[in-house]
Image: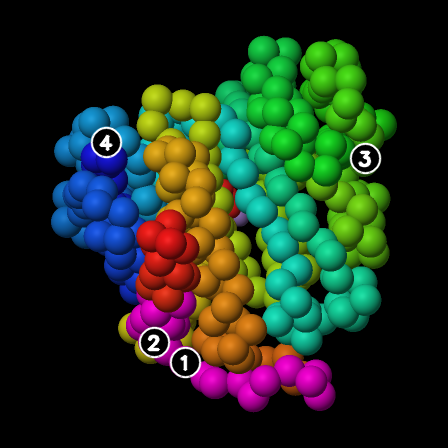
Amino acid sequence: MKLKIAILAGDGIGPEVTNEAVNILRAVAEFGGHDFSFVPLLLGGVAITATGSPLPTATLDACLESDAVLLGAVGDKKFDALSPDKRPEAGLLQIRHALGGFANLRPSIAYPALSANSPLRPEVTEGADILFVRELLGGLYFGSPREWNKSTGEAWNTMRYTKAEVARVAKVAFELASKRRKKVTSVDKANVLEVSQLWRATVTEVAKDYPDVTLEHQLVDSMAMHLMNIPRNFDVVLTENLFGDILSDEASIITGSLGMLPSATIGGAVNLFEPVHGSAPDIAGTGKANPLGAILTAAMLLRHSANLEQDAAAIEAAVRTVLADGNRTADIARGNVPDKSPAQHLVSTTEMGKLVHQALAQSIDQRQSMHAV
Ligand code: IPM
Ligand code: MN
């Protein structure tokens, strides 16, 4: 299989974690005889420094010509004083908009090996396996009018959705749920917001086409509570843009670290893959960054943009193996080690990448020798 992947490593720890994800993709290409090419491009703070723009035209054009886009992270304290439309994050929002993917998939899984890392008790997180489907192109992030009027001291943003925008992302959630545990929890604030009433009515209508999927509605405030209370009750969680931003960070508590979470944005001209975590400038260059979020993001890329399900699952299994063996980057080394778990080894970003590579190579070797029998 031939795949051209645009690499937008970005700022802070972005380049370090993306490097490990690319190494894993190279390994998959080598093992499977695929032809993957990687095109490094500028986005975010590094793009502002080099070109004055957080999303240079050259980057956007090249992304639109690729089969998939793999992003690291954007954001740099240097640009904190700039207005929202000039900051590194503006480049991220512009590229999301230009690529057109409206469904952002964010899995949040309780890995048994990390159960001591969550501040939640192991019996609370046990068995949790949630897939957030976050609408990514609407709501407060993109609605107009939007303004900060400095002379009157007022500011406003607009949470706007059309029925069509809600229906298309709801369909993605129901399709995914029908291949999982067949439950969709739709999140809104329909007791206060008209836009949420439209959301709820539209999702209810879409649900009629999926009779074997159960639909429940939750108000966002009580959802924030239920998510920490009984996370295993949720399968697919469907949200508008801002609610999904907030709840998916909250859900990282179930896994134990934001550094573990991958994401995929589908439905547009070119799919976009980015870990959920940010650029973490405070630990950039120290070797402390966790590359597993980026590596699991590479697995999602293989699943959603190349249909290489077996390879995606092999990467995910390799990640579970290195965790079960006790390997930990700093962010996941904090928990109290339960008596029966293996000793923990503190490893750097690149060491963690190499360990996943080894585990992956072993499992692929086994797969190939099984086929040979
Ligand atoms: C995320 C991030 C972005 C968002 C920021 C960096 C614009 O927090 O991907 O969750 O709010 O969508
Ligand atoms: Mn966020």
Q: Position of residue 359 (x, y in %)?
A: 40, 67
Q: Nearer the viewer, residue 353 or 9?
A: 353
Q: CA distance from mark 4 to mark 1?
A: 34 Å
Which numbered tag is attached to residue 347? 1
Q: Which residues are magenta?
A: 338-360
Query: Would you say 244 lies left or right of 204 here?
Result: left
Which numbered tag is attached to residue 66? 4
Q: Circle 3 is placed at which residue position?
A: 218
Q: Residues within 10 Å of mark 4 (few under 14, many from 20)?
A: some
Q: Is residue 317 above or below residue 351?
A: above
- Say which amino acid is labelled 4: Ser
The quarter in which the N terminus is drawn is: top left
Q: Nearer the viewer, residue 282 or 27?
A: 27
Whether residue 227 is visible to the viewer of this picture, yes or no, is yes
- Say which amino acid is labelled 2: Glu
Query: Would you say 210 lies left or right of 49 here?
Result: right
Secondary element type, mark 1? loop
Which numbered tag is attached to residue 351? 2
Kindly indicate the quadrant of the structure image that contains residue 350: bottom left
Whether residue 22 is visible to the viewer of this picture, yes or no, is no
- Say which amino acid is labelled 3: Gln
Kindly indicate the quadrant of the structure image that contains residue 6: top left
Secondary element type, mark 2? helix
